[in-house]
Image: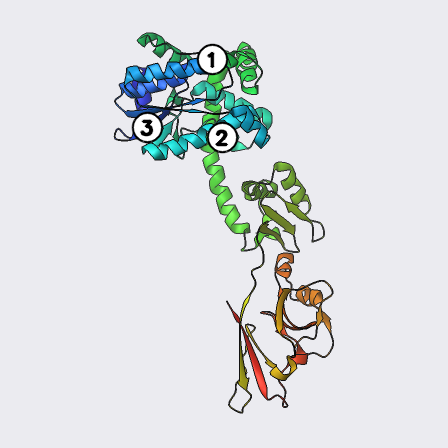
């Protein structure tokens, strides 16, 4: 019965095919032992991977010896690695649970590539999905966090999600297969164990079928999430620009703060930051927010989004000198300027504009602050930050790609012309 159920589940979600090689994560616990036994019995080509995290002293070594013996009996190749998990957790300033997970999955993927396996099979089951639902609910989550564990995530597959822990133990009992027990699973030191050992039994007193109810709810939310993400994708297309997010378009959406979260959360902004950004939309321009990798700037019409490590690339210029004759035609367009060569008395230099910079815009007589000029041109704050100027000494000759300085214009007295062209 259990083999038929898992076969149907594998086919339903197209987890892998009969010709694929499967790398099985094998801890030695009941779940992973049942997984490797079932896949082996069903005729799949398997290799096993075991991590010794050295967190439980002799018990960790006992688990390793058990999986070695099991794989030897099943004639399945076994790969074993050892980790100093506590040291890694301290180095990264994360919990031991998080460190073990990161070490485990990084090694699994390296091993999958090395042994040319199609997928990595892990032994999560229905009870794990219920615990994940409750864990995410307690911590706070969006709709995706309440969908339960997914059958497939990239190269990670979970063939046992169609079975409960009771199903797995029954299967192992029926075939007479032993397994090892992780003693930390019986302690309520970790949050997930508290849910398993304390919270779920209490909930079952209220509703004996609470696990089934949670799984059904997760299934409903899974379907709802498909519709949600379809609408979010369409809405994001309506509000995004090449520089960031159109504020007016965002506020016209049905749930603008939720949509803003969907736009910014993948860039590392948490819910509290997104709330602050949303409430800044009605305020004055200039407020800035940062995640580890991105900047968001509240401008007049836009939320400007820029990578933290992005710098304005120095423009490339081509300079040519020409005799000014009757046949010479001064090029038009913002990418090229012509100046009187005799007025260029020092080497030309390029730099980003600075506060206090002034110039005389072409066609005008009086000086104008560069900041005022860029504001009049409705430059965003990020565009302003990326504006370069070409200088002769302390004078600005050209706001590159924008406007030249009238003091260096070509006149009737000009004999030689410098043509300066911005190379895109």
Give the numbered dot on residue 22: 3
Nearer-the-camera pick, 206 or 373: 373
Which of marks 2 and 1 precedes in the sequence?
Answer: 1
Give residue 352's position: percent from left, percent from top: 64, 63
| Residue at the image point whose x is 42% and y is 15% from the top | 63
Q: For the image shown, how many numbered marks are present on the structure? A: 3
Give the numbered dot on residue 59: 1
Which of marks 1 and 3 precedes in the sequence?
Answer: 3
Q: Nearer the viewer, mark 1 or mark 2?
A: 1
Name the element at disc 2: helix
Give residue 281's position: percent from left, percent from top: 67, 48
* Residue hosting label 2: 102
Q: Is residue 372 above or below residue 95?
A: below
Which of marks 3 and 2 precedes in the sequence?
Answer: 3
Give residue 241's position: percent from left, percent from top: 54, 54
Q: Nearer the viewer, mark 3 or mark 1?
A: 1
Nearer-the-camera pick, 235 or 331: 331
Mark 3–mark 1 Cα distance, whole angstroms, equals 27 Å
Image position of 299 (left or right of 317)? right
Name the element at disc 1: helix
**Does residue 118 appear in this view?**
no
| Residue at the image point whose x is 61% and y is 60% from the top | 386
Q: Splitting the image into 4 quarters, where does residue 301 fall? A: bottom right
């Amino acid at each position: 019965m259990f083999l038929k159920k898992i076969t149907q589940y594998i086919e339903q979600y197209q987890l892998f095919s009969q010709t694929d090689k499967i790398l099985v994560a094998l801890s030695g616990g009941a779940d992973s032992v049942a997984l490797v036994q079932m896949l082996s019995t069903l005729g799949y080509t398997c290799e096993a991977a075991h991590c010794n995290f050295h967190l439980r002293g002799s018990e960790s070594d006992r688990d390793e010896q058990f999986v070695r013996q099991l794989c030897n009996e099943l004639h399945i190749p076994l790969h074993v690695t050892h980790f100093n998990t506590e040291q890694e957790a301290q180095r990264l300033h994360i919990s031991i649970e998080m460190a073990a997970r990161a070490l485990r999955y990084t090694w699994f993927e390296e091993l999958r590539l090395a042994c040319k396996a199609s997928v990595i099979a892990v032994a999560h089951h229905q009870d794990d999905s219920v615990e994940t639902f409750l864990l995410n609910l307690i911590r706070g989550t969006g709709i995706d966090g309440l969908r339960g564990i997914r059958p497939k995530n990239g190269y990670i597959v979970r063939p046992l999600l169609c079975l409960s822990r009771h199903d797995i133990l029954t299967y192992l009992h029926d075939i007479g297969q032993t397994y090892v027990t992780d003693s930390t699973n019986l302690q309520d030191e970790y949050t997930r164990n508290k849910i398993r050992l304390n919270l779920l039994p209490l909930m079952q007193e209220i509703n004996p079928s609470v696990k089934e109810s949670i799984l059904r709810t997760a299934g409903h939310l899974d379907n709802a999430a498909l519709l949600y993400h379809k609408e979010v994708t369409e809405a994001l297309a309506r509000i995004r620009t090449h520089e960031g997010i159109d504020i007016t378009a965002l506020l016209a959406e049905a749930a603008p703060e939720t949509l803003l979260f969907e736009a910014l959360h993948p860039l590392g902004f948490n819910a509290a930051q997104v709330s602050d950004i949303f409430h800044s939309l009605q305020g004055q321009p200039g407020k800035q927010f940062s995640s580890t990798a991105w900047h968001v700037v509240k401008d007049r019409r836009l939320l400007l989004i820029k990578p933290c490590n992005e710098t304005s690339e120095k423009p490339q210029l081509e300079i040519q000198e020409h005799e000014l004759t009757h046949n010479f035609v001064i090029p038009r367009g913002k990418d090229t300027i012509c100046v009187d060569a005799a007025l260029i008395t020092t080497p030309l230099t390029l730099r980003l504009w600075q506060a206090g910079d002034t110039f005389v815009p072409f066609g005008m007589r009086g000086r104008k602050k560069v900041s005022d000029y860029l504001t009049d041109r409705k430059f965003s704050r990020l565009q302003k930050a990326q504006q370069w100027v070409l200088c002769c000494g302390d004078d600005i000759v050209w706001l590159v790609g924008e406007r030249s300085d009238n003091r260096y214009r070509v006149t009737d007295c000009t004999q030689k012309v410098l043509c300066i062209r911005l190379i895109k």
